[in-house]
Amino acid sequence: QVQLVESGGGLMQAGGSLRLSCAASGRSSFSYKVMHWYRQAPGKQREWVAAITSGGSTNYVDSVKGRFTVSRDNAKNTVYLQMNSLKPEDTAVYYCNALGSDYVNYRGQGTQVTVSS
């Protein structure tokens, strides 16, 4: 059973930085086709934020372009979301979601990011 575990969230002042991690555990042979980061703010729908493919291609929602960077460490089965120049509107629960090479969707439990003004 593969599990995705996010970490790195917390409380940060506007303009600060946080790095989120999404680590896959439970199966050493786990691989993914694409890993997504989503977020959901209170009272709002879940929003796609960024993605990275197994080949390293990345994509971002316009609101985070130039501020967020998604990267991966295949040896550690971990994907990161570096978030710089944080804004209060970035406040949300952030989730990672993987489409595994087995075409199964895996989702983490989320990590809270709160940005104060």
Image: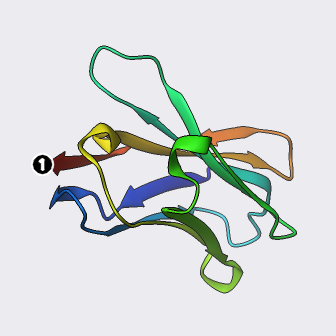
Q: Residue at x 41, y 44 (%)?
A: 94
Q: Nearer the viewer, residue 79 or 66?
A: 66
Residue 113 in view here: yes
Quarter residue 49 falls in: top right
Above or below: residue 36 compared with residue 52: above
Above or below: residue 80 compared with residue 46: below
In the picture provided, is 76 more to the left or to the right than 13? Answer: right
Query: Callout 1: helix, strand or loop?
Result: strand
- Could you say where residue 83 lies in the image, as x and y percent from the top left? 41, 63
Q: Residue at x 61, y 53 (%)?
A: 2
- Could you say where residue 68 lies in the image, as x and y percent from the top left? 51, 61
Q: Which residue is mark 1?
A: 116
Above or below: residue 11 compared with residue 28: above
- Could you say where residue 12 lies in the image, as x and y percent from the top left? 16, 60
Q: Nearer the viewer, residue 74 or 92?
A: 92
Residue type, label 1: Ser
In the picture provided, is 99 more to the left or to the right than 112? Answer: right
Q: Residue at x 27, y 22 (%)?
A: 42
Q: Residues within 10 Å of mark 1 (few under 14, many from 20)?
A: some
Residue 23 in view here: no
**Colour approach in the figure:** rainbow
- Could you say where residue 48 lies in the image, as x and y percent from the top left? 59, 35
Q: Residue at x 70, y 79 (%)?
A: 74
In the picture provided, is 65 more to the left or to the right than 44? Answer: right
Quarter residue 93 falls in: top left
